[in-house]
Image (tube, grey):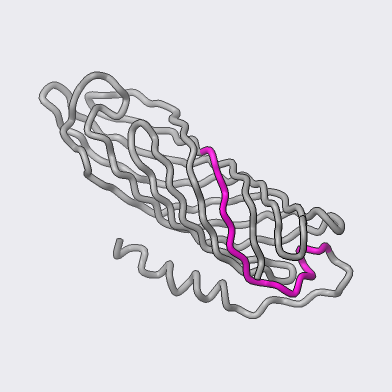
Amino acid sequence: MTKARWLLPLCLALLWAPAPSVADGRAVALEVDRRMYIGISGFTAQSRIRTEGGVGSGVNTLSDGLMLRFGRTGRPARYDVEIAQTNYDEARLRLGMASLDYLIPGGDLFSGFAGLVVGYASADWNGNDPLDGGDDFGVRNESDSGPVVGARAGGLIEVTDLVQVEIGYRYLHTEISSRFRGEEKSGKVRISNIRMVHAGVNFRF
């Protein structure tokens, strides 16, 4: 994880940076006095897992997971850091992400957001053939990791001054790979992208 040492200073800088100011009369999401928030979301993630060499195939794998976030709402931007985990049949995937969004006013109750995501992902591979071909590669508990970068967009619904509902989608590009060697086959397995749809609640304080 030495490659991810730069993430913590970046996340802290984003969270505590002075928020840019805009005129009043914008959406509620831009005007609240309570700037800090914590959030919890459920999500569904899909990844394309490709194989090379003796295995030579691919699969779109799908699973649900849980995501926690801590952030700050600014004017007109917001910043947050997130941790997420999902369990594919092929591997358990963990994500640590930092995001910067531009908030798009849409009225007193609704607003949108669009932003960029950077982070790091780790995959704990299962011991069997990742594509269920029947071969045991003997790699249980082995882990591989790599950076992720992508974009996200979605909508915010103001429930109260303290509670906000969030729905969103993100696309992340990554390169997590491992080489498997078994008695009959060997090959390289690679996760190349992560697509996530999430819905949850943010609590401001």
Can you tell which quarter of the image residue 14 is in? bottom right
Give the vertical position of 147 relative to 74 (above or below).
above
Quadrant where the C terminus lies? Answer: bottom right
Give the vertical position of 188 relative to 42 (above or below).
above
Q: Is residue 76 left or right of 134 when viewed as pictured?
A: right
Q: Residue at the far top: name it.
A: 134
Quadrant where the N terminus lies? Answer: bottom left
Q: Residue at the far left: name it.
A: 183
179 within the magenta span: no
Q: Residue at x 43, y 52 (%)?
A: 95
> Residue 141: image x %, image y %?
22, 43
Instruction: Report the number of discs.
Output: 0
Q: Which is more toward the observer, 190 or 39?
A: 39
Q: Is residue 190 left or right of 84 when viewed as pictured?
A: left
The magenta stretch is 27-44
Q: Which is more toward the observer, 187 or 100?
A: 100
Q: Residue at x 63, y 71 (%)?
A: 36
> Residue 140: image x %, image y %?
20, 38
Give the vertical position of 170 relative to 79 (above or below).
above
Give the vertical position of 161 relative to 176 (above or below).
below
Q: Residue at the far bottom: name it.
A: 18
Q: Is residue 190 left or right of 63 when viewed as pictured?
A: left
Q: Residue at the far right: name it.
A: 25
> Residue 97: image x %, image y %?
48, 58
> Residue 131: image x %, image y %?
32, 25
